[in-house]
Amino acid sequence: MKLTRAHRLIRIVQTLQSGRQCGVDVLAEAMNVSRRTVFRDIGVLKDAGIDCLYDAETERYRIDHAHFLQPLNLSLEEALSLLFITRNMINDRIVPLASSALSAGLKIESALPADIRAHCGALLAGVEVCGLQVSDVDAVADALLRIEEAIANAQMLRIQYDSYYDKAEIETVLHPYRVMFRRRGWYVVGHSEKHGEVRLFKLERILALTALDRSFDRPTDFNLDDYFGHAWSMVRGSRRYHVEVHFSAKVAGNVEEVVWHKTQRTRRRSDGSLVFEVDVDGIDEISWWILGYGDQAVVTEPEDLRKMIAEHAQTLVDYYKTGVQAPVTRE
C-alpha cells in the first residue's frame, strides 16, 4: 500500500531518528515508492529544516539526535503548568516574537502522552487570563533584540530619546546593563553618558538607536533590586519615608490581598478597616496610588505625604468648581 507524502515524511523521520542508517533502496522499499520519490521526500525534509545527513562511505542517511528534543517525562502537574503558560501567559502584547514562543510550546505539547494532553486540555478549558493593559510590543521588538545583543557584547549604543524628564528630545551614549518588562512596558537600564549616571529608558520613546564600535566594562555588582531600592514603582526618590495609610472596611480586602511592595505590613482593626504600612524611597508615586482609592484612604504619616494628598485633592475640587475641562500643568 502506498502512503501519502505526509505519512512518508513522518515514517522517514521516525525511521532515521530511531538511530537506523538507511540507504535509499531500503527507504524506497519500506515506503513502496521509487528511489526518485525518496530523494524528493528527503529534499522536502531538508527544506523544512530537518537535516538528513548522508554518509558517502556507507551510502546511508541518518538524522543527528541533537536535532530533536529528548523524549519528555513530565508529571501531570508539570504538564498542566506548561500548557497553562503556553496557552494563557505567552501574550503577543508582552512577549517579542511571541509566535515563535507559541510554536515552541505547541511542539512540546504535541510530544506529551495523549492521555496527559487530553486530561490537561479538559482542566484548562475553563481557564482564561484576561488581557493586560500594556504597551504595544510590536513597536519595540526590533529595538529590544538589538539592545539584548548589545548587552551580550558589552557594546555601547547611541540613542535619540523623547525624554519626559528633560521635556525634550535628547541624544546620549548608553552603556546598556539590563532590559526588563515592568509596569506595562519594556525598559532598558544603563549608564547614560549625557547624564553621568544610571538611567531608565522606555523602549517606546527611543526614536533612533545605533550600535557603536565601542565596548564598555559591565559592572559585576549591578542589579535591579539595588537600583530601584524601595521605590514604590519606577521612580526612586532621594529620601526614604515610613508611610501609614488607613483604608476603610469597604476596600480593605482589596488592598490586603495584593502584594503592592516588598516592605508592606498590614493589620486589620476591629471595625474591619485596614492599617497599611510601607517604607518607600520617595512619595510621588505612592501618592497617585493612594488617590486612586478616593475617600476610602486616609494618610496618617508622614506629614509631607498628607500635605501632598491634600494639595492634589484641593486641585481636583478647584477643577470641578470652576468647570475646567482638563488639568493645567503648573510650572
Image (tube, helix red, strand yellow):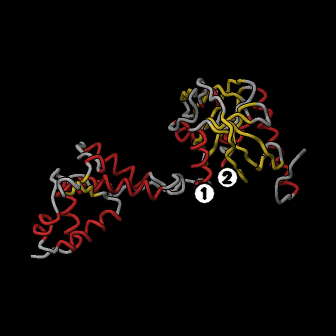
Q: Residue at x 38, y 52 (%)?
A: 86
Q: Is residue 297 above or below residue 143?
A: above
Q: Are circles 1 and 2 on residues that touch, CB within 8 Å?
A: yes
Outermost front residue? 57
Outermost right residue? 331
Residue annotated with mark 1: 136
Measured from the top left, where is residue 212 in percent x and y?
69, 43
Image quarter where the N terminus lies is: bottom left
Q: Is residue 119 visible?
A: no
Residue 244 horizontal side relative to residue 116, left or right: right
Measured from the top left, where is residue 321 in percent x and y?
85, 54
Measured from the top left, where is residue 278 in percent x and y?
62, 27
Question: Disc 1 or 2, which lies upstream in sequence?
Answer: 1
Residue annotated with mark 2: 204
Q: Residue at x 47, y 56 (%)?
A: 98
Q: Residue at x 34, y 47 (%)?
A: 82
Q: Is residue 259 above or below residue 220?
A: below
Element marked by disc 2: helix
